[in-house]
Amino acid sequence: MNILVINCGSSSLKYQLINSETEGVLAKGLCERIGIDGMLTYQPEGGEKEKSEIAMPTHTEAINAVLAALTNEKSGVIKSLSEVGAVGHRVVHGGEKFTSSCLINDESMKAIEECNDLAPLHNPANLIGIRACQELMPGVPMVAVFDTAFHQTMPDVAYTYGIPYEYYEKYKVRRYGFHGTSHSYVSKRTAEIVGKPYDQMKIIVCHLGNGASISAVNCGKSVDTSMGLTPLEGLVMGTRSGDLDPAIIDFVGKKEGLSLDEMNEVLNKKSGMLGISGVSSDGRDLEAAAETGNKRAQLALDVFDYRVIKYIGAYAAAMNGVDAIAFTAGIGENNIKMRKDVCSSLTYLGVKLDEEKNNVRGEERIISADDSKVQVLLVPTNEELAIARETLALVK
Ligand code: ADP
């Protein structure tokens, strides 16, 4: 069966068409500038990337453009839409309602909508994508795969904040965590590569991209993760601050005359490695700047690494041990020096990196020495494949 995987944002939409038998990607790409003008990128398997300007006043036109590209006589990969057996949608927030993926119907749509205020920037966009697909592909089964679902196994001690309990009762303010599809996929792959039963392992997954989070996966269940009610908490990210003293919001807001909304914007879009360095949110730019002697770029990289080291220590403590640590996502998969620097601070856990094995980008492999007490791995994440698998399991 061919499964169309859709990751829909407010003005962009990523897609992949995956053959569920071979798990190969038949075509992939993205729509950008939806609601502004519209740009489609389309790349069939083994073919060149094509870019075309197509008017996309709404997500419906964007998805229509994707479907037209997939069925195009010349560069398409399927003859007709009847060859799309199911659609898997990434949905950011499933609140406490969704502990796993679900088939999309009127009832689940209503429940997803009820989670909108927990992710006001993401969930409404995800819903728009689902509705546009329903309109263009009536009768094709669809599945929602939530970023938060994998972390719903966290115990109350991990998800409860130290604030009046009534805010949890009234507004469901608690830790949810994100990147769940990635943490689930990477932790399972880690157990497979190491060759130990998933339900007997203590694994720490470091998903380090522009958005970054770490999770503690004990016996196949997420027991803690660094992102919180929103993706702002935890690690220092590309543009997000991660953990900070909440009093800073009032202090800086008053000094700078910024409203709460404006402070929220500062913490989400102007902080993190961008804010510290003043150079860029992108790890590659920072490395280049640091090499030319830019001290703040170096500081940003060091602060990033230091926060990762602290979280790994915290999660080893939370699980009373750790068997494997896996690195994934843009920085985790590609930044050799970051992995080396982080691991050099984990010798107290029995971590021993093999520098030669670590000298690789984006390849699935064990990078710790044979006599390392804790196995360290590089596991490229594949959220689209994980969504396709979840979708297949529910529509079969
Ligand atoms: P997101 O999906 O959250 O937008 P990614 O997982 O794509 O983010 O990660 C983006 C980060 O990965 C950037 O900081 C970038 O510098 C880093 N990155 C990507 N490729 C490389 C590379 N080849 N070498 C070093 N860093 C890389």
Image (cartoon, rainbow, N blue to C red):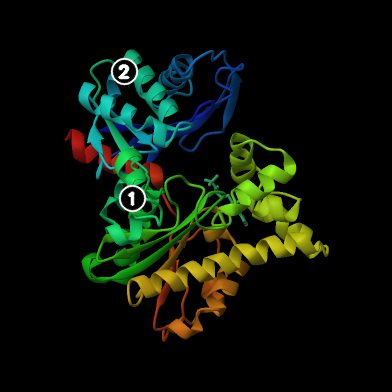
- Which residue is disc 2 drawn over? 134
- Report x, y in % for residue 23: 32, 43
What residue sits 46% from the left and 70% below the top?
312
Query: Mark 1 belongs to which amino acid?
Result: Tyr
Q: Relative to residue 77, is residue 219 depicted above or below? A: below
Callout 2: few (<14), some (14-19), or many (20+) C-alpha neighbours within 10 Å? some
Question: Which element is circle 2 on?
Answer: helix
Mark 2 vs 1, N-terminal side: 2
- Report x, y in % for residue 98: 26, 40
- Which residue is disc 1 drawn over? 165
Callout 1: few (<14), some (14-19), or many (20+) C-alpha neighbours within 10 Å? some
The mark found on residue 3 in the picture is: none
Is there any visible trace of residue 116 in the rendered image? Answer: yes
> Which quadrant of the figure has residue 361?
bottom right
What residue sits 75% from the left and 58% below the top?
288
- Report x, y in % for residue 177: 39, 50
